Image: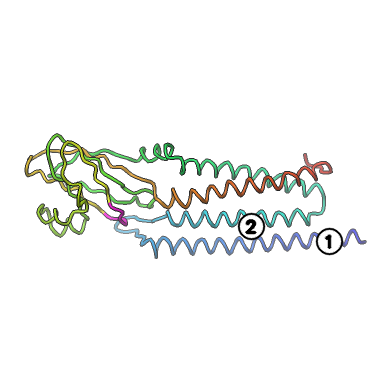
Amino acid sequence: MPLSKKVLEDSVRLGSIRRIKTTLYIVQVVMLVALAFFLVFVIGDATVTPNLYLPLDQFIAVMVLLLLVVCVECSFFRMMEIRFARSSSARHLMAKNSITRSMLLALISAVVTVILMVQPILAVVEDASQRTITTSSSEDFTFWSRDPLALQRVSELRVSSTQTLGIYLVTDSVYQQYDGDLSDMFFMRLNRDDYELVDTLTIPVPILDHALVHVVVNDLSSPGASVTVDIVKDTSETITGIVSVLSLAFVVTNIAWIAYLIPIERKYSQGSIYK
């Protein structure tokens, strides 16, 4: 009778732990959805029309942080489940499954951390998104300062030509307002210092929200001349900064959890029916 009572008490406790865990996860999912709406549509000024813009960089950072919290919570609840499990076999299986899952999470997190923190590897990803175009004063070449998901932004333009030209970066509102008037757009240009092209020129692009930018070619000194423009992009600072640090925290947390579970798994493996 005392043994049956102990088994019953442990079963009730395990059921309560799992109900609390499920309720907590549901609340956190609701919080994540609410935060997604707030960060993307309220703070991020997301738009669907006329141009799609859904800034996800800040949301990804918050999501990874919440997942890290959930990871720690999972460890806490698993500790309680192991404590109140009714047999050595159950304790061994719980510990073994948790070790396997943590090893997988640590491996995935390590890969993400290396990609985001090791500059040569990140540069390969950024180089794949770069593109080269040729334009002239007769063409209206434009680019968006950020991609539709705000995961990358245009950091600089590398311009080259065989002629000496003036290159002005202006926002769409300025371009529409002055409608091709080079003298007025000269004073409204974004590149205050780097605008005179002699063979090659690197133009840093200011940090802007999701803005349409026009590349205006002033060819009054060399009519009809064309320029080659390399568009260089950088990954969002939020992704390479906050997300990379949180990803590293995932690695450390899961390794620490594995180190804690290994003695427990070994302790109950001898009397376990699961091998």
- Bin the neighbour count of mark 1 within 10 Å (Cα to Cα): few under 14, some 14-19, many 20 and up: few
Whether label 2 touches label 1, CB < 8 Å: no
Quadrant where the image shows the N terminus: bottom right
- Bin the neighbour count of mark 2 within 10 Å (Cα to Cα): few under 14, some 14-19, many 20 and up: some
Instruction: Report the residue marked by disc 1.
Output: 8
Residue at x 12%, y 39% (from the top left corner):
164
| Local SS, label 2 | helix
Q: What residue type is disc 2 on?
A: Glu
* Residue 120 in picture, x, y percent from top left: 42, 37
Name the mark nearer the viewer: 2 or 1: 2
Q: Is residue 24 magenta?
A: no
Q: Is residue 206 above or below residue 110?
A: below
For marks 2 and 1 on the same chain, the one whose residue lies earlier in the sequence: 1
Q: Quadrant of residue 172?
A: bottom left
Q: Quadrant of residue 203?
A: top left
* Residue 187 in picture, x, y percent from top left: 14, 56
- The answer to which of 33 and 61 lies nearer the viewer is 61
Q: Which mark is residue 73?
A: 2
What range is drawn magenta here? 206-211
Q: What residue type is disc 1 on?
A: Leu
